[in-house]
Image (cartoon, rainbow, N blue to C red):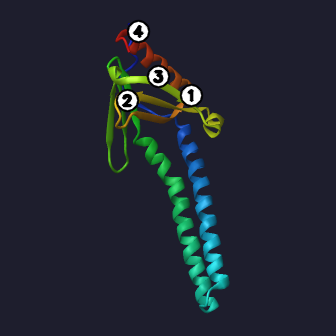
Amino acid sequence: MPESPRTEERQLDPRSVTLSRAWSAIFAVIVGLGFLFTTSMITIFGDSPRIVTWIGFGAAFFVPSFILVVWTWLWPPLQYRHTRYRMDQEGIWIIRGVWFRGETSIPITRIQHIDVTQGPIERAFGLGTLIIYTAGTQHASESLAGLSHEEATRLRDTLIAFGESDGV
């Protein structure tokens, strides 16, 4: 049987904060462009007096855009601080949640197969996602994004080695 890795809780890779901010920024730009287009059309083609329309334009575009920018900057570090995992010979535990804390326990005996994936942006940051597929139909997979690619691969290989001793 392989030697058990450390069983203390571990954090995600710190680069996951930057990756989350990048994804959030992309989302914020798309939503901001939608607000800009919509409020511009209302301003140009609306029947209200121009000063009221421009005040409405400012409120409808800049307020949500400001909120999105603040959210993009502040949420990823909070999410990073409140996501942990640990693994031993019995399985893997994933703990996450800023407002509502959730703990997912996946016993080795329930694991069907494990994947490590990397999208192009994750690859640029050297990060990966560990996806664990479990037996059963409800919540048949669990993913842990924000790991270094090396750590995700190591976790996959260790879980596979633990599962081999159980006949999985």
> Which marked residue is nearer to the observer: mark 2 or mark 3?
3
| Residue ID for mark 4 | 2
Please name the residue shown 65% across and 77% down the image: 40
- Per the image, label 3 sits on a secondary structure element best described as helix
Please name the residue shown 51% across and 25% down the image: 151
State the residue in front, 153 or 5: 153
**Residue type pointed to by label 2:** Glu
Residue 87: x and y in percent read 38, 23
Using a 10 Å C-alpha cutoff, classify the residue at mark 2 as few (fewer than 14 neighbours), some (14 to 19) or many (20 or more).
few
**Residue type pointed to by label 1:** His
Where the C terminus falls, by quadrant?
Answer: top left
First along the sequence among labels 2 and 3: 2
Lateral position of residue 167 relative to residue 80, left or right = left
Lateral position of residue 114 relative to residue 109, left or right = right
| Residue ID for mark 3 | 155
- Per the image, label 4 sits on a secondary structure element best described as loop
First along the sequence among labels 4 and 1: 4
First along the sequence among labels 2 and 4: 4
- Per the image, label 1 sits on a secondary structure element best described as helix
Picture layout, residue 127 above or below residue 87 = below
**Residue type pointed to by label 4:** Pro
* Residue 149 - label: 1
* Residue 121 - label: none
**Residue type pointed to by label 3:** Leu
Check contact, mark 4 vs mark 3: CB within 8 A. Answer: no
**Label 2 to label 3, Cα distance in Å?**
13 Å
